[in-house]
């Protein structure tokens, strides 16, 4: 992939990286953008620097550990006023899998302003370039005035694990996804009309375990990896859906009906009697099976 | 002679990770050093006790991204030991494939960074380009270039179709010639010899005393590789020789890595040739009973140990690690003693220190 820089800047834009305690995944992928021609930040008119005071764009990785905080803030204070700050990977935004630890002091935004987020765990180099391009655009817009423009990117059909997608129509509300999610990215809420699932792309680490254990395929991993966004939009980066309640055909209690996918998984060839089970509440199902409700 | 103390951090040492050293100099030579750890301490021991077994697979894969497959696969082996689960044979082979792919990429990254440190930029780029073949293969097969998400308790959750296996075999073929060429370069190229041969020497006696592991130990002539000494998974059915070098210097460590990367290619080819048909994972997940287990494996940086204790609930009550970098970076004291300041970044990188693993 090559993203063409719009103007051939003579003075390169300098990138400075701070690792706030990452697993090193994001950092190793950033190293790729300084070493591998196809992904070299040079194509965007950028170059890495080892001096904080030269940072035009600041790239921050990791969940911000308590131990690293002082050093991170010291380096941050050395960077120029007008730099653009980019959170690389989900760690700085939500803590990723490390959230809720005594040793982690994120999110980064509590300590310093962030301009652009690049979700991923780690983001692939194409996504890093897209996020850096977004930061460049923001930098240009700030200097020249006007609104930043989001660039279209060449699409590749590589089977990367990207954004999770949720199909409420086949969800049976078993909540195994939430149980297996290491990042706490999935939340269920029982509302007036149904149960809703919310999945936060800035928390998700794209491991795909939820979709692996989902019995009906309601959650699936898509190849959509372009998730960079202005940090102000962080809370809009969600996947959401509602499974509506339906009245139990036996007693009328509102229930979550079983999806046809579940019946097929459980019974292979469901007969009409089994089909009827899906619209019964547990008490009425017991009644149907053993004649009396179990106590 | 004047004595002074200096502090060096990731930006002076060309490290991807925030590791800090306090170095005592006599003149321009290193007299002693202290590692100032903790920047990457994320409280892993606390976190694993608050996540269930499923969640821990994803969490542990992010303990360190360079050996990211070694952690969940060793963790799963410990859980399987406690629960008495035998994983399907196909899964054993697929775990070995994932581990060896990661080993190649990890070793090449280490060799690349060292070339960069000594100003051999063209070689740095060349090694990184060769590594890209593996990065692409990882993304094509597993969907991510660092974190493979290959393991589940009881087996694996990825498969190699006939086309997938053929694709991987082609990528392995493409690695052979570049790896052979890199081995020769790191072995004989005069520009590298000048910087790497006889530099950062760890005598064998000191290597034993510090109990170093992995390429650091094998570079000192110590024939120790967990895959051979106590084979796990499919390794008792795979042929390879433990790569050993005698020099104990930076050059020797890199030659071990490059020889191992080449062997990993052969190991993956053997896995593809022997890959038995069958399930990927034990069907139902049994309850994990109360118990304890130790599992170990040969991670790219050396022997990795997991100690797990369970109490019958779905969360570990204890999980402890011994990671290879812990012993290896202690031995830096010996390797750096008497070396000029200018050699510090190279020698530090030559042990391939993993701070994420060690600070946890
Ligand atoms: S976002 Fe993922 S890859 Fe990046 S540092 Fe965090 S855990 Fe590692
Ligand atoms: S892929 Fe699913 S299980 Fe994994 S972090 Fe994202 S939401 Fe959680």
Image (cartoon, rainbow, N blue to C red):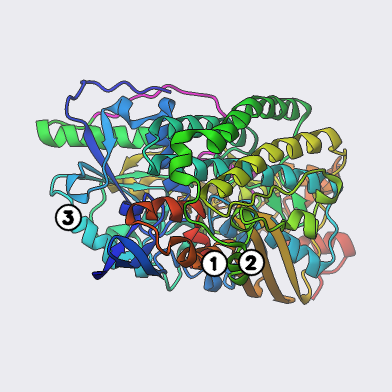
- Indicate the position of residue A207 as horizontal and vertical percent values: 58, 48
Q: Secondary structure at mark 1?
A: helix
> For the point 27% across and 32% down, which residue is it?
A46
- Residue that lies at the very extreme toward the left in this rendered image: A144
Q: Nearer the viewer, mark 1 or mark 2?
A: 1
Which residue was labeled with disc 1? B326
Horizontal side, residue A136 vs residue B38: left or right: left
CA distance separating discs 1 and 3: 32 Å
Counting every numbered tag in the picture gives 3
Residue A287 position within the rendered picture, expressed as x and y whole percent measured from the top left? 83, 64
Residue A78: numbered disc: 3
Can I make out residue A248 in this image? Answer: yes
Q: At numbered mark 3, what does the secondary structure look like: helix, strand or loop?
A: helix
How far across and how far down the image is residue B289, in percent?
A: 79, 74
Gap in Å between the C-alphas at discs 2 and 3?
A: 42 Å
Residue B52's tag is 2
Instruction: Work out whether residue A254 can be spotted.
Output: no
Query: For the residues carrying marks 2 and 3, which lies nearer the camera in this image?
Result: 3
Inter-mark Cα distance, 1 to 2: 27 Å
Q: Is residue A42 above or below residue B153?
A: above
Does the magenta run of residues contain B288? no
> Is label 1 in contact with label 3 (beta carbons under 8 Å)?
no
Dot 1 or dot 2, earlier in sequence: 2
Chain ID at mark 1: B
Q: Residue at x 33, y 59 (%)?
A: B9
Q: In front: mark 1 or mark 3?
A: 1
Neighbor class of circle 1 (other Cα within 10 Å; few <14, some 14-19, many 20+) is some
Report the front residue among A125 and B280.
A125
Q: Secondary structure at mark 2?
A: loop
Highlighted magenta segment, given as a residue range: A149-171
């Amino acid at each position: 992939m090559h993203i063409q820089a719009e103007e051939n800047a003579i003075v390169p834009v300098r990138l400075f990286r701070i690792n706030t305690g990452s697993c090193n995944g994001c950092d190793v992928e950033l190293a790729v953008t300084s070493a591998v021609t196809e992904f070299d930040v040079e194509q965007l008119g950028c170059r890495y620097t080892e001096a904080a005071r030269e940072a035009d764009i600041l790239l921050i990785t990791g969940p911000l550990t308590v131990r690293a905080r002082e050093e991170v803030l010291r380096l941050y204070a050395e960077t120029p006023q007008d730099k653009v700050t980019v959170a690389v990977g989900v760690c700085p935004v939500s803590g990723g899998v490390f959230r809720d630890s005594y040793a982690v002091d994120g999110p980064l935004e509590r300590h310093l302003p962030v301009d652009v987020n690049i979700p991923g765990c780690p983001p692939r180099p194409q996504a890093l370039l897209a996020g850096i391009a977004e930061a460049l655009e923001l930098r240009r817009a700030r200097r020249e005035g006007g609104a930043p423009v989001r660039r279209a990117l060449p699409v590749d059909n590589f089977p990367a694990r990207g954004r999770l997608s949720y199909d409420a129509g086949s969800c049976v509300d078993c909540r195994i996804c939430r149980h297996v999610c290491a990042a706490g990215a999935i939340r269920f809420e029982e509302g007036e009309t149904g149960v809703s699932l919310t999945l936060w792309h800035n928390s998700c680490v794209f491991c795909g375990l939820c979709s692996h254990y989902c019995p009906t395929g309601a959650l699936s991993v898509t190849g959509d990896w372009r998730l960079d966004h202005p940090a102000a939009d962080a809370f809009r980066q969600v996947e959401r859906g509602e499974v509506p309640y339906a009245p139990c055909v036996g007693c009328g209690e509102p229930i979550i009906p079983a999806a046809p996918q579940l019946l097929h998984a459980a019974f292979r060839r469901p007969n009409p009697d089994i089909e009827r089970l899906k619209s019964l509440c547990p008490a009425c199902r017991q009644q149907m099976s053993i004649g009396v409700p179990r106590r | 002679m004047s004595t002074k103390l200096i502090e060096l951090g990731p930006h002076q040492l060309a490290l991807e990770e925030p590791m800090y050293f306090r170095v005592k100099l006599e003149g321009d030579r290193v007299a002693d050093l202290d590692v100032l750890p903790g920047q990457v301490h994320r409280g892993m021991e606390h976190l694993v006790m608050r996540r269930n077994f499923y969640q821990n697979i994803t969490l542990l894969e992010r303990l360190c991204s360079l050996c990211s497959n070694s952690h969940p696969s060793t963790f799963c082996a410990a859980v399987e030991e406690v629960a008495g689960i035998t994983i399907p044979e196909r899964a054993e082979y697929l775990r070995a494939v994932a581990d060896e792919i990661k080993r190649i990429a990890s070793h090449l990254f280490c060799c690349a960074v060292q070339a960069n440190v000594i100003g051999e930029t063209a070689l740095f780029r060349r090694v990184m380009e060769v590594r890209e073949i593996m990065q692409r293969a990882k993304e094509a097969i597993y969907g991510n270039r660092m974190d493979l998400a290959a393991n589940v308790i009881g087996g694996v959750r990825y498969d190699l179709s006939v086309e997938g296996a053929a694709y991987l075999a082609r990528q392995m073929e493409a690695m052979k010639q570049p790896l052979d060429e890199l081995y020769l370069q790191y072995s004989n190229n005069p520009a590298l010899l000048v910087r790497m041969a006889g530099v950062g020497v760890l005598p064998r006696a000191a290597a034993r005393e510090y109990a170093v592991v992995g390429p650091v130990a094998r570079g000192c002539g110590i024939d120790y590789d967990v895959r051979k000494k106590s084979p796990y998974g499919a390794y008792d059915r795979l042929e390879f020789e433990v790569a050993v070098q005698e020099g104990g210097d930076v050059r020797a460590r890199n030659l071990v890595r490059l020889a191992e990367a080449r062997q990993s290619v052969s190991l993956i080819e053997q896995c593809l040739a022997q890959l038995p048909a069958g399930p990927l994972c034990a069907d139902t997940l049994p309850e994990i009973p109360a118990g304890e287990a130790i599992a170990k494996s040969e991670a790219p940086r050396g022997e990795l140990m997991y100690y797990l204790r369970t109490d019958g609930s779905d969360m570990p009550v204890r999980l402890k690690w011994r990671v290879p970098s812990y012993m290896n970076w202690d031995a830096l004291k010996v390797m750096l003693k008497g070396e000029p300041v200018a050699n510090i970044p190279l020698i530090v990188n030559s042990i391939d220190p993993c701070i994420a693993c060690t600070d946890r």
